[in-house]
Image: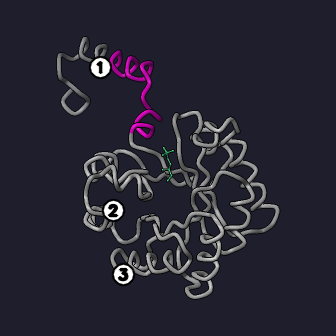
Amino acid sequence: MKLLIDDANIDAIKALYPIYPIDGVTTNPSILAKSGRQPYDVLREIRAFIGAEAELHVQVVGRTADAMLEDVERIHAELGAQTYTKIPVNPAGLEAIQRLRKAQPDAHITATAIYTPMQAFLAAKAGADYAAPYINRIDNLGADGIATAKIIQDMFTKNGLPCNILAASFKNSQQVQALAQYGVGAATIAPAVIEGLVRNAAVAAAIDDFTRDFESLCGKGVTMKDAK
Ligand code: G3P
């Protein structure tokens, strides 16, 4: 399962990248608004930092298929044709996905705003590379986000659809773990939830104990590099 950062804060992205095995960055219009910066200013900076090969997902904002495809054209021009364009799965979005796939067989397409398995199924048939179910938002509707993602994964496998899940909207580590265990293609996660994946008082205490025991043997601040 690939891991992506669901954020447009360049400082947060720069802080997480050296620590965690990250495969890319996803954004949406709300995330860009939260950055408080003009979209292409921040997106160009993210692209320059993560490099041309890493996945960058940028959402269209147009509300018709024509307007979505114009957004795709500008996103590709500004950030590279390898950029994944996120297209919401409503009727206009499905039309846009089909037209984009026909016009640009190599385009990278992420179908987004997915709350139901049938949205994902139709997006995959239309030609999307990724389908992005919103795990926590589905939970908040009284449904089951993890179960929905598993149904989508099974539908893709059983129908031979070459589409992967890019699960989004996580609130906690357990949601991420359940999907890693199921082997979905990717998860995009907000910085605070990424940091929570390894935040554990027992781990911190164990490492503190190792340091204290070693220092009792060798002296304060001594590590293996300067021990006798
Ligand atoms: O792009 C969709 C995803 O970012 C939604 O996450 O936390 O706003 O539910 P959230």
Circle 2 is placed at which residue position? Answer: 50
Dot 3 amino acid type: Ala
Mark 2 packing: few (<14 Cα in 10 Å), some, or many (20+)?
Answer: some
Q: Is residue 175 left or right of residue 196?
A: right
Q: Is label 2 in contact with label 1 (beta carbons under 8 Å)?
A: no
Does label 3 or label 2 sit earlier along the sequence? 2
Q: Main secondary structure of the magenta part?
A: helix
Q: Which one is nearer the viewer's eye here, 130 or 96? A: 96
Mark nearest the camera among 3 and 2 is: 3
The outermost residue toward the front is 63
What is the CA distance from the residue labelled 3 to the residue labelled 1?
52 Å
Mark nearest the camera among 3 and 1 is: 3
The outermost residue toward the bottom is 103
Whether residue 55 appears in this view of the structure is no
Does label 2 or label 1 sit earlier along the sequence? 2
User: Secondary structure under badge 3?
Assistant: helix
Q: Is label 3 in contact with label 2 (beta carbons under 8 Å)?
A: no
Residue range in magenta is 192-210
**x 52%, y 69%: residue:** 63
Say whether residue 206 is magenta: yes
Q: Is 5 drawn above or below residue 128 in the view shown?
A: above
Looking at the picture, how far across and down is residue 15, in whole percent?
Answer: 28, 46
Circle 1 is placed at which residue position? Answer: 211
**x 61%, y 72%: residue:** 92
The outermost residue toward the right is 158
Dot 2 amino acid type: Ile
Q: Is mark 3 within 8 Å of ligand 1?
A: no
Q: Is residue 154 left or right of residue 223?
A: right
Looking at the picture, how far across and down is residue 95, in whole percent?
Answer: 64, 76
What is the CA distance from the residue labelled 3 to the residue labelled 2?
17 Å
Circle 3 is placed at which residue position? Answer: 77
Say whether residue 3 is magenta: no
